[in-house]
Image (cartoon, grey):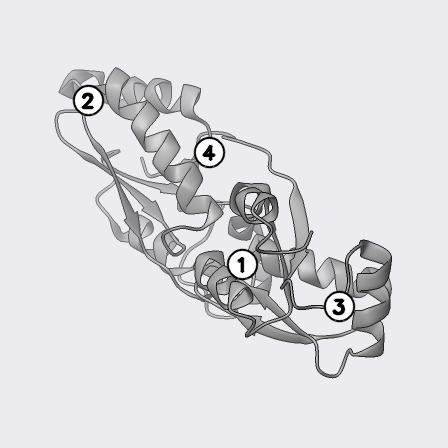
Amino acid sequence: MRFLVRILPAVALAVSAGALAQQYPTRNISMIVPYAAGGPTDTVARVTAQAMGKPLGQTVIVENRPSAGGILGPEQVKNSKPDGYTILIHHIGMATTPTLYRNLRFNPLTDFEPIGLINDVPMTIISKPQLPAKDFKEFLDYIKKNKDKVSYANAGIGAASHLCGMLFMSAINTDFLTVPYKGTAPAMNDLLGGQVDFMCDQTTNTTSQIKSGKVTA
C-alpha cells in the first residue's frame, strides 16, 4: 500500500496490518513533504516523524520535495515501491489539485491509501510590519484603496495559503497580485523582507512571527 499520512495513531495500525509477516518496519521510513523546509507542513511532519520513530523502532526521515502547489511529492510517493516505507504528509491541497492542474500525474482517490488526520490548524492573515494598518479594519481599507499595487504571497496554486487568499478575495470582492512560491517558508522570508505585502498561513507557521512582532496579524 501507498500511504497518505494524516494521523499518527493510525500509522502503526495501518502499516502493521498489511506487513505483519515481514515484521514491519525493518529499516528507515521516508516521509515525503511536498513543500519547503521550515513551512507549516514541514513543521508538522518533523514532529510526527519524531513521535513515530520510537514506537516503530526505526528512524522516520523527512524529505522535502518543494514545488508549486505541492505536486512533486505525491508523484514521488505514487511511483515508489508500495511497501509502506515511503509515506506522504499533505494538507487540503491534496484534494484540490485535480481541479487546478490539467495534466496531474496522480489521482488522490486511487493512487494512495489515506490513514487519517494529524491536526486541524486555523489560518491567519498577516502583513508586513511596514504596511500602514494595525488592525483588520485598517488593513481592509488599505488593501481596497491600493488593490492595484498590493501583493499576496502563497505556497503555490492549490496550497492552503492560496485557497485562503482566494476565499478572502472573493469575500471582499477585490483582486490582488498573487505571488506563488514553492512553500510558505520562502513566502514568509519575502514577507519579512518587505518584498510582498501579506499572506494567509497556518498558525503553525505564523504564531512565532506574530508574537515577535515581525508581522502584523
Residue 135 location, quadrant: bottom right
Seen at 45% across and 57% down, the residue is 185
Kind of residue sitting beneath label 2:
Tyr
The earlier-in-sequence mark between 1 and 4 is 4
The number of numbered badges drawn on the structure is 4
Residue 15 at x, y percent in the picture: 31, 24
**103 shown above or below 200:** below
Q: Which residue is mark 2?
A: 24
Contact, CB < 8 Å: mark 1 with mark 2?
Answer: no
Q: Secondary structure at mark 1?
A: helix
Q: Which residue is mark 4?
A: 6
Residue 174 in the figure: left or right of residue 90: right
Query: Within 10 angstroms of label 2, few (less than 14), some, or many (20 or more) residues?
Result: some
Q: Give the alpha-carbon distance from disc 4 to disc 3, as whole Å.
A: 39 Å
Residue 119 in the figure: left or right of residue 151: left
The earlier-in-sequence mark between 1 and 3 is 1
Residue 145 location, quadrant: bottom right
Q: Which sits in the foreground, 126 or 35?
A: 126
Q: Which sits in the foreground, 92 or 122?
A: 122
Q: Which residue is mark 3?
A: 132
Q: Give the alpha-carbon distance from disc 1 to disc 2, as whole Å.
A: 32 Å
Q: Give the alpha-carbon distance from disc 3 to disc 2, as whole Å.
A: 56 Å
Q: Secondary structure at mark 2?
A: loop
Q: Give the alpha-carbon distance from disc 1 to disc 4, as whole Å.
A: 17 Å
* Of marks 1 and 4, the one in the foreground: 4
* Of marks 1 and 3, the one in the foreground: 3
Q: Secondary structure at mark 4?
A: loop
The earlier-in-sequence mark between 1 and 2 is 2
Instruction: Report if residue 198 is visible in the image.
Output: yes
